[in-house]
Amino acid sequence: MLKEDLKLAKRILNERRLSLVIVKNGTVLYESSASGIVDLVKAVISLKHKMWESSVADKVVGKAAALLLAYSKVKGVFAEVLSESGLRVLAENNIEFEFKKLVPVILDREKRTVCPFERLTLRVQSSEEAYRILRSLV
C-alpha cells in the first residue's frame, strides 16, 4: 500500500498544486497549499497517531520537516526539493523517500540565508526534541 499511497499523494500534490498531501490506505488525511513548515506542524498536532505509516508528499523537506516526519512515524516521503540533512534524517529513520531535486540546505523565502526552521534544528538529533521546538512556534 505504501507505493500506491505515495503515488496518490504525489499525483494530488501536482494536480492540485498543493504544498503538502498526507495519504494513508488510499485516503487523503490532510492537504495544504500554504508554503512553509507551519501546516506540517499543524498536521502532526491534529492527526497524531493517524500519521503513523502514512505517505507524505511535500514541496520542500529539510531537516526540520524530516524530523517531524520521523516523529510521526511516516513510512514514505516524496519531496520536490530535499536537503542533504533531510535525506540523512529520513534514511536514518528507515523512511522510504523520493525526490526531484537534492540541495545542500533549505534557504529562506528570499533565498539569502538558511531557513529559520533549519537553523532551529541544526543541532537537534531527536525527533521528539524537534517536535517540541517546532510545536511551540505554532
Image (tube, helix red, strand yellow):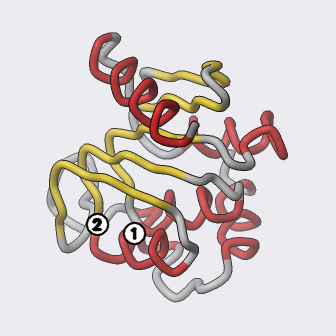
Task: Check if mark 1's residue and mark 2's residue have beta carbons within 8 Å.
Answer: yes
28 in relation to 20, above or below: above
Residue 60 at what x, y percent from top left? 33, 48
Q: Residue furthest right?
A: 49
* Residue 100 location (% of width, % of height): 18, 48
Relative side of 31 to 29, left or right? left
State the residue position of label 2: 83
Q: Quadrant of the C terminus?
A: top right
Q: Residue at x 44, y 69 (%)?
A: 63
- Give residue 96's mark: none
Which circle marks residue 86 in the picture? Answer: 1
* Placement of 11 over or under 77, stated as above or below: above
Q: Is residue 58 above or below residue 73?
A: above
* Three-letter code, disc 2: Ser
Tell me which residue sits at (66%, 53%) in the image: 137
Taking the spot 59% from the left edge, 56% from the top edge, the residue there is: 69
| Residue 112 x, y percent position in the rendering | 15, 61
- Label 1 is placed on what type of residue? Gly
| Number of numbered markers | 2
Q: Position of residue 28 (x, y in %)?
A: 61, 20
Horizontal relation, residue 134 to residue 63: left or right? right
Q: Is disc 1 placed on a helix, strand or loop?
A: helix
Q: Name the image quarter holding residue 46.
A: top right
